[in-house]
Image (spheres, rainbow, N blue to C red):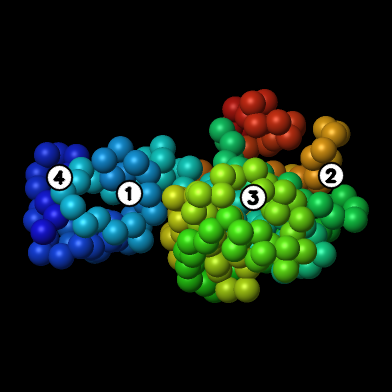
Amino acid sequence: MPTITLPDHSRRQFDHPLTVQQVAAAIGPGLAGAALAGQVNGRLVDTSFVIDQDAELAIITARDEAGVEVLRHSCAHLLAMAVKGLFPTAQVTIGPVIEEGFYYDFAYERPFTPEDLEKIEARMVELAERDIPVVRQLMSRDQAIALFESMGEQYKVEIIREIPASEALSCYRQGDFIDLGDDLHPVQGKQLRAQHRRVVLIAVDNNHPNQPPHGILGSAFPGRTTHRHDAWLLPAIVHDHRPESASLPLP
């Protein structure tokens, strides 16, 4: 019977293990709808994380800094999914969150054009509207290598080979798209759409050796906007691909 201690020091006792999302629902429907992740005993986890013993829990929403990170992480995942749908031969590499947004590197036969970016932006909005469920799968390193080799994702294979063989890997499947991940579960489209965002992407070419040649950057922030496209907000203008310098003041 786990006892959950909340940030206000109140406690809730349950007679069975339950997920972070179920705890949020027990507190109230508004919090359940806003929940993006949870912080369990100081560890940031997705809302499907099962709590089976006493724990301290904070429900993470878009008002929290960690919630913004989850949204950016989810946008990066959605970006990769859109690119693979439009350009099937593009190889997906890494797509971390950066200070003012997110980026993803791709190995593709040519640079992405402004016309490509418009198509990718539209596909991201379309995918978000479809609200495709995101499913987490745990795999061994060898299973993940075999999977991504079968997909022709050689950059992912090389990344996975650097991970210790004893470490279980998280993969996230959304429709036909699957990618590596961590404890932060990408949120579904309805939660992204609830933040009233707009997609604006910037293409950059990498000049660094041993890196995939083409990158796409964007930015995502929570909150409502009166922008002409009220589905997404990506206000940052990014001039450099390197995360440490990819941040400028908001307009």
Q: Is tag 4's residue or tag 2's residue first in the polypeptide sequence?
A: 4
Residue at 28% across, 49% down = 59
Q: CA distance from mark 3 to mark 4?
A: 37 Å
Residue at 72% across, 49% down = 158
Q: CA distance from mark 4 to mark 1?
A: 13 Å
Q: Is tag 3's residue or tag 2's residue first in the polypeptide sequence?
A: 3
Residue 89, given in percent of the width and then of the height, sits at 82, 64
Residues at circles 1 and 3 in contact by the CB criterion of under 8 Å: no
Residue 46, given in percent of the width and then of the height, sits at 39, 54
Q: Which residue is mark 2?
A: 213
Q: Which residue is mark 4?
A: 5
Residues at circles 1 and 2 in contact by the CB criterion of under 8 Å: no
Q: Amino acid at mark 3?
A: Ile
- Label 2: element kind: loop
Taking the image as shown, residue 101 lies to the left or right of residue 93, namely left
Q: Which residue is mark 1?
A: 38
Q: Is tag 3's residue or tag 4's residue first in the polypeptide sequence?
A: 4
**Number of residue marks:** 4
